[in-house]
Image (cartoon, rainbow, N blue to C red):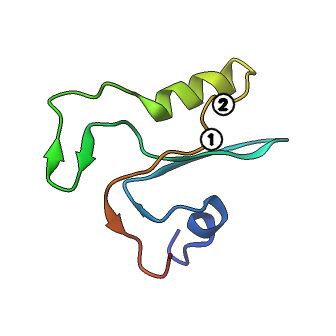
Amino acid sequence: DPKHELTQAAGAKVTPESAIYAPGKGWVYCGRIDDRHAGFGLKRPAATSEDLQVALRAVLDGREVPQASSRAIGCAIPGQS
């Protein structure tokens, strides 16, 4: 996505941040992959919440994504504010 067209459409602001587009529903999730990073420089030994996995499972099962967004910790994507 060199021109950040998908980044802008999804509303992604930092890396790593994930987004899910579901046909017929549009953007259903944008946020962190998991909660391994609790803050800048604060990393858990293992994730306690797998946000992206939960969202993907909901989409694949035909259910609503329980949480449409979550705050990702990472470096800002240039040109996104």
Q: Nearer the viewer, residue 5 or 81?
A: 81
Q: Which mark is residue 65?
A: 2
Q: Which mark, by number, is residue 68?
A: 1
* Observer-nearest of 59 and 68: 68
Crowding around mark 1 (Cα neighbors within 10 Å: few <14, some 14 to 19, many 20+) is some
Picture coordinates of residue 16, whole percent (x, y): 37, 54
Secondary structure, mark 2, is loop
* Residue sitting nearer the eye, 67 or 25: 67
Query: Horizontal and vertical percent for residue 63?
Result: 73, 22
* Residue at image coords 58%, 22%: 57
Residue for point 75% across, 21% down: 62
What residue is rendered at 33% in x and 54% in y?
73
Quadrant in the rendering for residue 56: top right
Residue 39 numbered tag:
none
Q: Tag 2: residue type?
A: Val
Q: Is residue 23 left or right of residue 31?
A: right
Up-down relation of residue 49 to residue 69 (above or below) = above
Q: Position of residue 5 (x, y in %)?
A: 62, 71
2 versus 42 height, above or below = below
